[in-house]
Amino acid sequence: MTMRRLLAGVTVAVVLIQPVPAEADHRRGGDPVVIGHRGASAHRPEHTLLSYEAAIALGADYIEPDLVSTKDHVLVARHEPEISGTTDVAAHPEFADRRTTKTIDGVPMTGWFTEDFTLAELKTLRAKERIPDLRPDNTAFDGLAEIPTFEEVVQLAQRSGVGVYPETKHPSYFDSVGLSLEEPLLEILERYHVRKAFIQSFEAANLRELRSKTRLPLIQLMTTAPAYDPMVTPEGLREVATYANGIGVDTRRVVPVGPDGRLLPPTTLIADAHRRRLDVHVWTVRNENAQLPLDYRRGNPASPVYGRATGDVMGWLGRLVELGIDGAFCDDPGMGRAVVTRPPSSAA
């Protein structure tokens, strides 16, 4: 699928704005929200109940499950439908013949895919750390956790008093194989009377469909890919505001990175979005030097552990908070909680 298809329905023209429902307005007017990115993925293998529980304990306001579908149309939390990097599926000889190659949103992928397994079959697998070289401590939890269903994540959030922030992953692809994500997503949110939630997607057409079906706030995700450039203009944001309540952007959309790896002056994106009453949530704030802007890396670059050593993540997030973000996806929600609750004068 082309990026043009992914952005279907976005017209960068000056149009009469139809306000999104008032009940969907979750603007806090206070501290930015801390979103546990895939749980607390700095400390536990991502998209496991272990990770979500850690995020809650560390002070996350919301926990984020990326949603894909099983063969029997149950939503589960995985970053991608291809699961060889996040589970032990390759060690299960009974599933060896299900390894295949598929093209999803124009990208060929080889491995095992959730839509080729029933939920019962997926529950026989165990999660593992996706990036063990960067997060070796997380490998201590390999083999301990199942793949959770979206329902299980919602139940945990409800028990703990936090919100959920689901992302529909590759919704057009799942539509094409008869496993639409929107209906089961909304059914679970409605069944559990979830009111503290954001729904996010990189696809505009997907969000437009959801807008007609729910009053929960919607977030238009954007990468730094050129295809999203029209969306971040004042005219593009005006259009986004007709169906979404906020934008979820790569931090480089807020503070670009120069050719030398150092940060450049901030853009006007936050102010432009706020003029359209759009919240701005940024992704992803990570602990490791390798994941931070050069300005906020710490330690000796010659050290063999330099890349995975913790940098000045609190300083980086503090700068983003001072620029006016409304929320941040954090691999370590504890760091996020510490920053957003301290006095603004000390968040530099």
Image: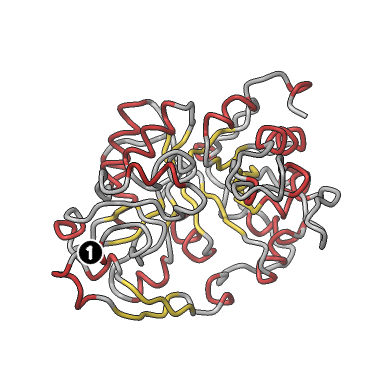
Q: Judge by depth and name the residue closer to the eye, 289 or 245.
A: 289
Amino acid bearing label 1: Ala
Where on the picture, by quarter, is residue 112? bottom left
Please provide percent x and percent y for residue 22. Answer: 54, 38
In-front residue for pair 57/1: 57
Relative side of 335 to 312, left or right: left
For residue 19, say whether it is visible.
no
Q: Vertical placement of 51 versus 124: above or below?
A: above
Residue 72 vs 45, above or below: the answer is below
Above or below, 54 relative to 137: above
At 18% from the left and 70% from the top, the residue drawn is 95
Q: Residue 232 is drawn in which quadrant?
A: bottom right
In the displayed structure, does residue 89 sit left or right of residue 8? left
Left or right, 320 with reference to 73: right
Percent position (x, y) of residue 14?
A: 74, 63
Screen quadrant of the C terminus: top right
Dot 1 surroundings within 10 Å: few (below 14), some, or many (20 or more)?
few
- Identify the residue under disc 1: 91
Image quadrant assignment for residue 223: bottom right
Identify the residue at image location x=53%, y=43%: 21
Foreground residue, 77 or 230? 77
